[in-house]
Image (spheres, rainbow, N blue to C red):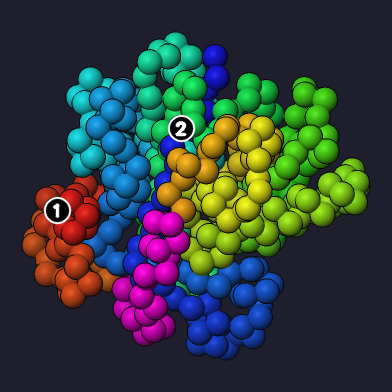
Amino acid sequence: MKIGIDKIGFYTPDLYVDMRELATARGIEPDKFTIGIGQEKMAVAPLTQDTVTLAANAALDLLDEADKKAIDLVIFGTESGIDQSKSAAVYVHELVGLDSAARSFEIKQACYGATAGIQMAKGHVALNPDSKVLVLASDIARYGLNSPGESTQGAGAVALVISANPKIMVLEDKSAYHTSDIMDFWRPSYSDTAFVDGKFSNEQYILFFETVWKQYQAKSGLTFKDFEALCFHVPYTKMGLKALKPTLEAEGTKEDQERILENYQKSIQYNKVVGNIYTGSLYLSLLSLLEQTIGLEAGSRIGLFSYGSGAVGEFFTGILQPDYQTYLNSTQHKNQLSARRKISIEEYESIFRQELPIDGSTIKLDTSNELASIYLMGMTENKRQYVNKQRLD
């Protein structure tokens, strides 16, 4: 049975910071952000949005009534959950109007969560060929103002429908994976920002790619010549290149290197202007590749490297399907990105410092950009935010 990605889409907040302006404000040479780590813009989530609203908006743009009837499993990959008990998937299940005869749950393993969800979805569809699975990857990356990781923040969500006989990509069966208990990145319950050992995390990311790539080659017998492109989890867009280039230069022909490096650049165009969205970064990269590349033919094999700090890594592959371009929403995605509003560094810092009340009180927010106000019930970690009003009307 062929199982894979039937639909894919994304959503990001309508606010962003220009990375050159952020660098200047921090007394840093702007090229260190735009060239050094490869980031141009950073999506900023206002207080009216969280991982639930981001994911719900991504799904609302993707699903039709037939999908809603067929989906009997919702898997939400995130490390920015809004509740220590109730899954974000249950909120989205209601917001997008899915049938009640469905399982809904959340997966956490840093940036690897959505990949785990996709692999579980494949197993579910194999047992239930007529069903579909909604996999959500939604996160808000926060490291803190003036912190070393500030330039690798971002916010957004990717939604995927996994089904039999998929229209976009068939996911192949062979994959390679690796786990190691390390502390390169962590987000303790007492902190609303993440902690990271940047140098160590970069080293482990590269090591994990080398490890799973060798494992995959041993299992499959495939080499770089068998791939049209490779997509990576990209906390910043130069990260994937750091892992790819040494192995590609050692093993690939000149033709392999030119093809794969050219397509890598296409695969990071969306990530450059959104920033790090943790669980969704790999799939935003895949979407960028598919929507930015002219002439990427059906039958092409795409490699995908997923890495979640702490750490779990996986390399797996997919085959593009006939007329896959017909089922992409590239115009909508490009329009969404171009319609965003640039905010000043002062506005960004003010938004970053805003906090939700923890006493159950109602708060009033600026709705000039058509975002909904929030009513909080209970503690902050049990909050319920609503999807943008204009997107539900």
Residue at 81% across, 39% down: 224
Quadrant hosting residue 353:
bottom left
Quadrant hosting residue 84:
top left
| Residue 333 included in the magenta stretch of the image | yes
Residue at 11% across, 69% down: 364
Q: Nearer the viewer, residue 304 or 326?
A: 326
Residue at 48% across, 63% down: 274
In the figure, 289 relative to 43: above or below? above
Left or right: 363 in relation to 293: left
**Which residue bears the numbered disc 2?**
6
| Label 2 to label 1: alpha-carbon separation | 26 Å
Q: Main secondary structure of the magenta part?
A: helix
The span picked out in magenta is 331-353
Look at the numbered discs 2 and 1 and tell me whether their residues touch, using CB distance below 8 Å.
no
**Which residue bears the numbered disc 1?**
393
Secondary structure of the residue carrying numbered label 1: loop
Left or right: 115 in relation to 374: right
In the figure, 272 relative to 177: above or below? below
Secondary structure of the residue carrying numbered label 2: strand
In the displayed orientation, state which residue is furthest to the left: 362
Tell me, yes or no, if residue 261 can be seen here. yes
- Give the label on residue 13, or none: none
Residue 174 at x, y percent in the picture: 67, 23
* Other residues around mark 2 within 10 Å, as few (<14) / some (14–19) / many (≥20): many
Residue at 69% across, 35% down: 301
Q: Amino acid at mark 2?
A: Asp
Q: Amino acid at mark 1?
A: Asp
| Residue 236 included in the magenta stretch of the image | no
